[in-house]
Amino acid sequence: MPYLYDRYEAAYANILPERIDGETFLKSHRDHKDPVTVIDPKRSYAVRAAARHPIYENFRVKVSFCTSFLAAGVTPFAIYKYVCKGCRFLHFIATYLLEVFYS
């Protein structure tokens, strides 16, 4: 199943730098359009880890969301039919749960 983290690992992880220092970033991009934070030219930033964390955390939360319904006694088919309507990602999770449940 093509999850978001698979797409991140396949398409983006290898092209993102592991780290970048603030000075290099500011020379390339000048600004980051965030009025709340400041880029310190002398600091090094972990780019790949910063990108990876929300993607994997999002996946973990969505799996937990679906499995909570299972724990409450909702059948995988009901999760598939009602919870995942209109959400492609939850559709993948529910399909996986159906495969596991009925195999």
Image (tube, rainbow, N blue to C red):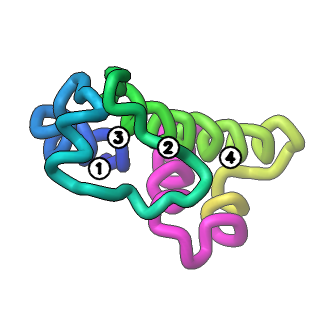
What residue is shown with label 1?
Answer: 2
Q: How many marks?
A: 4
> Any mark on residue 38, and which?
2
- Report x, y in % for residue 54: 50, 40
Could you say which is closer to the camera, residue 84 or residue 38?
A: 38
Could you say which is closer to the camera, residue 58 or residue 30?
A: 30
Asked which quadrant contains residue 42, the reply is top left
Dot 3 alpha-carbon crowd within 10 angstroms: few under 14, some 14 to 19, many 20 or more:
some
- Report x, y in % for residue 94: 56, 53
Q: Earlier in the sequence, mark 4 or mark 3?
A: 3
Q: Is residue 24 above or below residue 69?
A: above
Dot 4 alpha-carbon crowd within 10 angstroms: few under 14, some 14 to 19, many 20 or more:
many
For marks 2 and 3, give the one nearer the viewer.
2
> Any mark on residue 18, and which?
none
Amino acid at dot 2:
Val
Specify whether 59 is left or right of 61.
left
For marks 3 and 1, give the one nearer the viewer.
3
What residue is shown with label 4?
Answer: 66
Q: Earlier in the sequence, mark 2 or mark 1?
A: 1
Q: Alpha-carbon distance for marks 1 and 4?
A: 17 Å
Magenta residue span: 81-103
Q: Earlier in the sequence, mark 4 or mark 2?
A: 2
Asked which quadrant contains residue 32, the reply is bottom left
Asked which quadrant contains residue 8, the reply is top left
Kindly check if marks 2 and 3 are in contact, taking CB atoms under 8 A apart as contact. no
Q: Alpha-carbon distance for marks 2 and 1?
A: 36 Å
Say which element carries label 2. Answer: loop
Say which element carries label 4. Answer: helix
Q: Residue at x 17, y 47 (%)?
A: 27
Q: Alpha-carbon distance for marks 4 and 2?
A: 38 Å
